[in-house]
Image (spheres, rainbow, N blue to C red):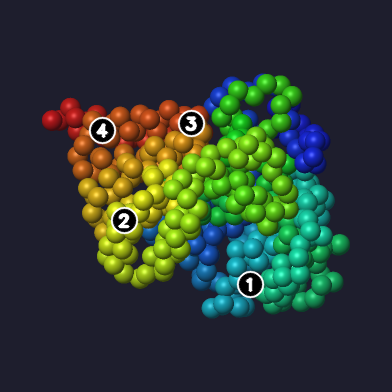
Amino acid sequence: MAGKFEKSLSPGKGNGLRASLSFAVGELVTCAEPFVYTTCKDKTAGTSVCDYCLRRSENLQRCSQCKFARYCNSLCQKKAWKDHKRECLCLKSILPNVPTDSVRLVAKIIFKLLEQPECTSGELYSVTELQSHFKDLNEDMIQGLGHLAATLEQYLKKEIPDSSKLPPGFQTLDYFCKLTCNSFTICNGEMQDIGVGLYPSMSLLNHSCDPNCVITFEGTRLHLRAVKEIPQGEELTISYIDVMMPSHMRQMQFQRQYCFTCDCNRCVSRDKDEDMLAGGEEASGAMERSLVTLEELRSQNKALKLCKKLIDESQLPSKNIYKIKALDFAMDLCIQLKIWEEALQFGLQTLEPYSLYYSNYNPVRAIQIMRVGKIQLHLGRFLEAMTTFKQVFEIVKVTHGRDSGLTKDLLELLGECEMEMNAT
């Protein structure tokens, strides 16, 4: 990490990271390991990944003590034991109740700080230096954090019976705030949430709605890559949120979660706001409310029927973000129901608007195109699938690198297409 970038002051933003040398598009800026991390047990995707390496598996082995943590094999369990042993006792003491991801993660921070009180947890920034913005919270937020703190106290009783056993100067509410502002959602190759972790030095990265870097993950390891030419001395930026929402909605999320106002060019110019709500705010709002209702339906068949009706009757253009969400929702339902032809038609309609709102080198756009390619391959449309997968490759070789697991999977799919085409 040293030598490639440095901690700097960013005007109006506080701390930031600045390139110490120039970076080409697709160049790996750095890799980072987490100070602490945990799987997303709150989410379905997190229930089938190893608690140590975060690899997906259908045959995970449960910890024999807590019956909660799950591992690929005895090797992963052995490697995890140093960090899991105190958590194991806490989980065992409260099961079948399971605390939230944030409670478990703060507990892991406490255990780590007790074991390594002098640990800096990063070359440029330590976990103790992370900003919390506690003073910016309103009463409702503070009350919510109070509930989490009470849950944490109950969870830790087996290992930490009272506050005198906490790390010196440890403020529980402060650390819950630090998590909110500084944690990274760990995603697998398909951009599904599988974990959450703290990477203190990477928390120095400031936000832009049109960033020059992206973050991807290989297991627990964070990879930061340049998606634009970055000259020496330029600030390194990433996007904190999904940018496919109007600027006023992005600003609301920035204030609520990160306590800042974004002044990037896209926000100042309200770039693409008109496109995102094309067809009118009233019609967009109606579509949004309908989608919320549809997502609450238990019956996939019924939800699909109503979603198709909503799409057919809607006067909104495909570039409207709520129309895109409806198309995505219909595509997902068709995949679940194995209605492949319709899934493909819905997916194809999303590709142009995805290219409008996501930059050329964006992992979210790559995964959407890849999903379409997989359906084409399943339907035996090998030439179409190969063309689609080649588009994905042009993106992921920049966002993920040529040696990533996703890129290797993609090359296998391209090989499968070529083999099938040669066979026919």
Q: Is residue 55 left or right of residue 17?
A: left
Cα distance in 3D space between marks 4 and 1: 53 Å
Disc 1, SS: helix
Please name whichever residue, 94 or 7, is drawn nearer the observer in this view of the structure. Answer: 7
Which image quadrant is residue 238 in?
top right
Percent from the top left, x then y, of residue 285?
48, 58
| Mark with earlier residue (4, 2) | 2
Disc 3, SS: loop
**On-image quarter of the N terminus:** top right
Which image quadrant is residue 105 in?
bottom right
Callout 4 amino acid: Glu
Cα distance in 3D space between marks 4 and 2: 30 Å
Residue 313's mark? 2
Residue drawn at x 69%, y 77% as measured from the top left: 154
Residue furthest left as drawn:
424
Callout 3 amino acid: Asn
Residue 360's mark? 3
| Mark with earlier residue (2, 3) | 2
| Mark with earlier residue (1, 2) | 1
Q: Is residue 320 left or right of residue 167?
A: left
Q: Which residue is mark 1?
A: 89
Residue 384's mark? 4
